[in-house]
Image: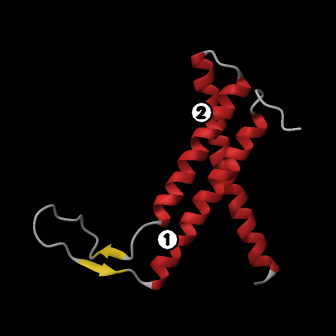
Amino acid sequence: MSAAVLLAAARRLLVLFGVIAGGTVAISLIAGALAGSSVNRSVSVGLYLVGCFLTVSGFFIGNRGPVRVKGAGAVPLIGSRMMRWATPEEREETINDSALFVFLGLVLIALGAVVDSRFTLV
């Protein structure tokens, strides 16, 4: 892979992380102000919650089976269900999405631990 491709991927990852972390911090500050909590506490709890949600979501996305619904419609509740095997590209996309969710979740949890004022890291 060329350096330009890796640089573009890193830029997209940082933008994605910035949007998720920034949105989490903003919503946490609002919720903390409404609850009367301190800034450090509300931000750390928000980062913990979103990080845990992303990590668990990544786990479940990664454990999706190799069978997919045939067609773009919803699965009928009664009658035969049209199923097909996932293509190699779909399986690769599932693993990549799972890895991205777990990575972002773990980074948010680590950032929450850094922000949390109840514990000292050093």
- Mark 2 lies on residue: 27
- Mark 1 lies on residue: 94
Tell me the quarter of the image containing the N terminus. Answer: bottom right
Q: For the residues marked 2 and 1, what is the alpha-carbon distance in whole angstroms? A: 29 Å
Q: Locate residue 10: give its quadrant.
A: bottom right
Q: Position of residue 48 (x, y in %)?
A: 63, 39
Depicted 74 relative to depicted 22: above or below: below
Left or right: 77 as drawn, with respect to 9: left
Depicted 69 relative to depicted 26: above or below: below
Q: Position of residue 98 (x, y in %)?
A: 54, 64
Residue ID at (82%, 78%): 3
Question: What mark, if any, has residue 78 been given in the picture?
Answer: none
Tell me the quarter of the image containing the C terminus. Answer: top right
Indicate the secondary structure of the residue bearing disc 1: helix
Number of numbered discs visible in the structure rendering: 2
Depicted 1 relative to depicted 17: above or below: below
Residue ID at (68%, 32%): 43
Along the viewing direction, whichever of 18 and 69 lies nearer the viewer? 69
Depicted 106 relative to depicted 90: above or below: above
Residue ID at (65%, 18%): 37
Q: Badge 2, how many Cα within 10 Å: few under 14, some, many 20+?
A: some
Q: Badge 1, how many Cα within 10 Å: few under 14, some, many 20+?
A: some
Residue ID at (62%, 51%): 105
The kind of residue tagged 1 is Thr
First of labels 2, 1 by sequence position: 2
Left or right: 34 as drawn, with respect to 38: left
